[in-house]
Image (cartoon, rainbow, N blue to C red):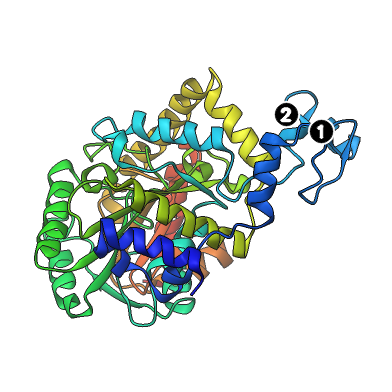
Amino acid sequence: MNELAQALNSALKADNEYVYDMLSPLGKEMFYPKGILSQSAEAGKKATKFNATIGIATENNQPMHFQHIQDLFGDRVAPKDLFPYAPPQGKETLRSEWKKKILKDNPSLDGAIIGNPIVTNALTHGLSIAADLFTEEGTPVILPDKYWGNYNLTFKTRRGATVATYPLFNEKNGFNVEGLKETIAANKEAGKVVVVLNFPNNPTGYTPLEDEAKEIVAVLTEAAEEGLNIVTLIDDAYFGLFYEDSMKESIFSLLADAHPRVLPVKIDGATKENYVWGFRVGFITFASRSEAVLNSLEQKTKGLIRGTISSSSHPSQSIILQSLQSNEFDVEKDEKFALMKRRADKTKEVLNKEEYQKYWTYYPFNSGYFMCLKLHTIDAEQLRLHLLDKYGVGTISINPTDLRIAFSCVEDEDIEELFDLIAQGAADLA
């Protein structure tokens, strides 16, 4: 094992051996090398005469570039913020701004116990990093039965983890805390579990109420007290789009200092909450009272980034940074929130039509981009194909009974027609 990895592991063991035990074999081996990048960083600070380190070309004291590309940005983004490599961990100013945003959005969170967010190539990359750090063959990954299908590739296919599910909703159509508790208990012999909490949930659009969130934390804390190590991955892809009576902060806030055996990892990004899907800018943020733990996890994360994509897009980071610092950011964010809430409200209003009840009920939704229909007798995939072929309507079949509808991409005035066509398709097949 590399001596740098050994030093990071020793620091983890000294401050929180449980976190060390949570690491996968790859996570234990990982480190950030003292190579070209670290030497270039030193040169960037001290090489005042000539800097002949990193592999870029320069011209007239700035990064060499094609002018026709720079012309696309004009003087809004300088060449230095577009063309050179960004650091593996991301632009430092962007990391700081995103941490400010996390603390502003989650006022109950103590800023002293979270690390600086590390920039990822959007949210899926953050999940992949977490999978590499903490999962291996047979690691139980605990999910609700309604989850984003890409988790299978990330955890099962890539890392050989075992997915264990519980019903998302209980008999009262609330979050199934008891189901989560039972599934954790059923996997406690593994010694370590990964619990993924995705709110607002994809595909259902459900976010727990405040009391439910506290119950979730209590379940995790109780399991930790009993000796189980728990990596809690908080998938905050749709954070902030809370339309009704759900919790309004990330559950990361409640878990950040819950127990030494509980490691909260917040994975989020500008992608969906700031409507820049193609920019591919996300973040992974660790919580711990130990600076040594935060530093060790950051160095290991940087090593994973360096060894895979090297670094994330510099232009995207620079544009997101300018957006966060813009006076228009909060104004436009509120405008888009109001628009999304109108679509969610209209969807719920339309779903109350009596003629629909013979074909489906719907799962609770109070947030996010989506909602799910629960079909009574018709197969969801059969209906999906029929809607596509006969009516030109696209939906997503999740399983034989559930059909996901993204109201996020349907104008308010078209929502009723959308569901009328879905009902017509169901009538055709009934």
Q: What residue appears at the point 60 percent right and 27 percent down from the top-left corner?
A: 322
Indicate the secondary structure of the residue bearing disc 1. Answer: loop
Apparent side of residue 249 relative to residue 392 in the rendered image (left or right): left
Apparent side of residue 238 relative to residue 376 in the rendered image (left or right): right
Q: What residue appears at the point 51 percent right and 24 percent down from the top-left corner?
A: 329
**Residue 210, position in %: x, y?**
17, 41
Q: Is residue 367 above or below residue 293?
A: above
Q: Based on the displayed image, in which of its 4 quarters is residue 133 positioned?
A: bottom left
Q: Residue furthest top?
A: 327
Q: Which residue is mark 2?
A: 77
> Is 218 in front, or is 422?
218
Amino acid, disc 1: Lys
**Residue 327, position in %: x, y?**
53, 17
- Report crowding for label 1: few under 14, some 14 to 19, many 20 or more residues within 10 A (C-alpha): few
Q: Disc 1 or 2, which lies upstream in sequence?
A: 1
Q: What residue appears at the point 54 percent right and 51 percent down from the top-left corner?
A: 122
Q: What residue appears at the point 69 percent right and 55 percent down from the top-left corner?
A: 36
For marks 1 and 2, give the one nearer the viewer.
Answer: 1
Q: How many marks?
A: 2
Tell me if I can see residue 58 in this picture: yes
**Residue 176, position in %: x, y?**
16, 60
Do labels 1 and 2 touch, CB within 8 Å? no
Q: Based on the displayed image, in which of its 4 quarters is residue 82 positioned?
A: top right
Apparent side of residue 155 relative to residue 35 in the rendered image (left or right): left
> Is 114 in front, or is 33?
33
Q: Which residue is mark 1?
A: 49
Give me the disc on residue 221.
none
Amino acid, disc 2: Val
> Is 203 in front, or is 405?
203
